[in-house]
Amino acid sequence: MSSKTVEYSVQTTTRKVFWENPYLVELETRVTGVAANEVTLESTIFYALSGGQESDSGVIGQHSVLQARKEDHQIFYQLPEDHGLNVGDTVKVSIDWARRYKLMRLHFSAEIVLEIVMAKFPAIQKIGAHIAEDKARIDFFWSENLSPVLAEITAEAMRVVHSDIRIVSDYSDKDLERRYWEIPGFARVPCGGTHLRQTSEIGEISLKRDNVGKGKERIVIRVDERTPPEPS
């Protein structure tokens, strides 16, 4: 249902706590809008698909979130039709922490790989990216096979990982909700995803090249399996 049919309370823009603390897995908040099976919240830790990073998985008021979508500065959550929530209700939001943490690790590994590739090949053009729970991918317009340079790119990426540098994540324009991440001495990049605290959290990175059509190259990125830290 269109967002225009949503009946809102006074506050209409969701406070995005997943930017303030991406390690938070539970949050109590209020419902600010309801349109059939779609709701909006006063604040949220539940990330919605944006910039190639997939949505979180979890529940709102014990109801499974079927879909999360971002529209301008608002996030809309689709719940089962019998959710029974009303504007003003207090609800608990909970996310799947293991999934969130894996997405953050793959997201940031892809960010680092992209910066290295763009520095190595100034004429290369990124045409797409996707971060799922099992792997990430970056697609490029590029006529050369990238396989011969993957070992070098991996080694450069792992040097950043092993440096264990604090990752800065903040607003470049708070009113417009423009965000960035920065690894001092490496790169500063506009990005509205959820970010790790330290580069070492990424873990071991492995890269594979795929050919997805004439003049196109894809780098598939995976990270090692590990138990996520305790959320905070």
Image (spheres, rainbow, N blue to C red):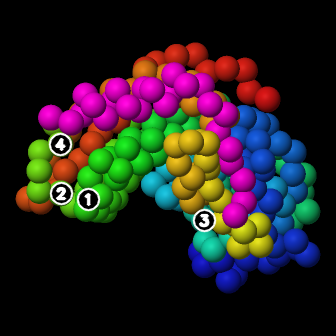
The answer to which quarter of the image holds residue 33 is: bottom right
Q: Earlier in the sequence, mark 2 or mark 3?
A: 3
Q: Nearer the viewer, residue 93 or 158?
A: 158
Q: Earlier in the sequence, mark 3 or mark 4?
A: 3
Q: Is residue 160 magenta?
A: yes
Residue type, numbered disc 1: Ile
The residue at which mark 4 appears reads as 146
Mark 1 surroundings within 10 Å by alpha-carbon count, few (fewer than 14), some (14 through 19), many (20 or more)? some
The answer to which quarter of the image holds residue 213 is: bottom left
Q: Does residue 157 appear to the left or right of 219 in the view shown?
A: right
100 relative to 114, above or below: above
Disc 3 from disc 4: Cα separation: 34 Å
The residue shown at (68%, 48%) is 169
* Helix, strand or loop: magenta stretch: helix
Q: Earlier in the sequence, mark 3 or mark 1?
A: 3
What is the residue that sits farthest to the bottom in this orientation? 4
Disc 1 from disc 2: Cα separation: 6 Å
Residue type, numbered disc 3: Lys
Q: Position of residue 177 (x, y in %)?
A: 70, 67
The residue at which mark 3 appears reads as 70
Mark 4 and mark 2 in contact (Cβ < 8 Å)? Answer: yes
Residue type, numbered disc 2: Trp
Mark 2 and mark 1 in contact (Cβ < 8 Å)? Answer: yes
Residue range highlighted in magenta = 148-172
What is the residue that sits farthest to the front in this orientation? 185
